[in-house]
Amino acid sequence: MKSTSISLGLVALRIGLGVIFAVHGAQKLADIAGTQSFFASIGLPLATLLGPAIGVLELVGGIAVVAGLATRVFAGLLGCTAVVAIITTHAANGFTVDAGGYEYVLVLALACAGLALTGPGSLALDHAVARRVRHDAA
């Protein structure tokens, strides 16, 4: 029973986190010029390349996290983008989200860290792929 509740908890975490990142990625891609302009305004290097790249990472990574595919890799990468967002955008505004602070993005970064460290649980494509690889190797 404990294993089932842990797996279901990780599914809930993956769905919530993945949807948030996928939506944010889609927003960035829907307004590439605005994303590039914003990234340039906060001093990020190569904003014309970085804007679309982060948008794609968030969209594809978010979908992959929901599915539980390459979860540790995508959660780690998405967590890094959240940390960069804290440093470049939110930290100067303090902690609380109502002032544009970093509390919300910190929760995203910590949730990503949790998934990167624990993995997606048994109800994930990662688990099915690993089982298939073991079966094919035997």
Image (cartoon, grey):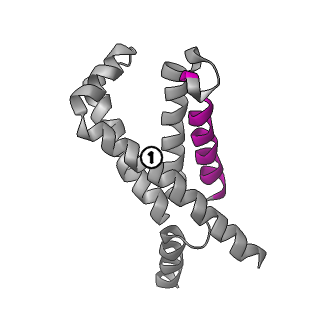
Image position of 6 with respect to 54: above or below: below
Image position of 66 with respect to 2: above or below: above
Q: Residue at x 62, y 67 (%)?
A: 121
The secondary element bearing badge 1 is classed as: helix
Q: Residue at x 27, y 40 (%)?
A: 29
Residue 46 visible? The answer is no
- Residue 103 in the magenta stretch? The answer is yes
Q: Position of residue 57 (x, y in %)?
A: 37, 44
* Label 1 Cα crowd, 10 Å radius (few <14 / some 14-19 / many 20+): many
Taking 37 as reference, is 103 left or right? right
Taking 10 as reference, is 80 left or right? left
Residue furthest left in the image: 33
Image position of 67 with respect to 42: above or below: below
Q: Position of residue 10 (x, y in %)?
A: 62, 63
Tell me which segment is drawn in magenta. Answer: 99-118
- Residue 104 in the magenta stretch? The answer is yes
Residue 40 visible? The answer is yes
Q: Position of residue 50 (x, y in %)?
A: 32, 30
Question: Residue tagged by mark 1?
Answer: 21
Quarter-of-image position of residue 9: bottom right
Q: Position of residue 62 (x, y in %)?
A: 43, 52
Q: The residue under label 1 is which amino acid type?
A: Phe
Residue furthest front in the image: 98
Quarter-of-image position of residue 127: bottom right
Q: Residue at x 58, y 29 (%)?
A: 97
Taking 52 as reference, is 15 left or right? right
Q: Residue at x 51, y 60 (%)?
A: 15
Q: Nearer the viewer, residue 24 or 59?
A: 24
Residue furthest right in the image: 2
Quarter-of-image position of residue 1: bottom right
Q: Main secondary structure of the magenta part?
A: helix
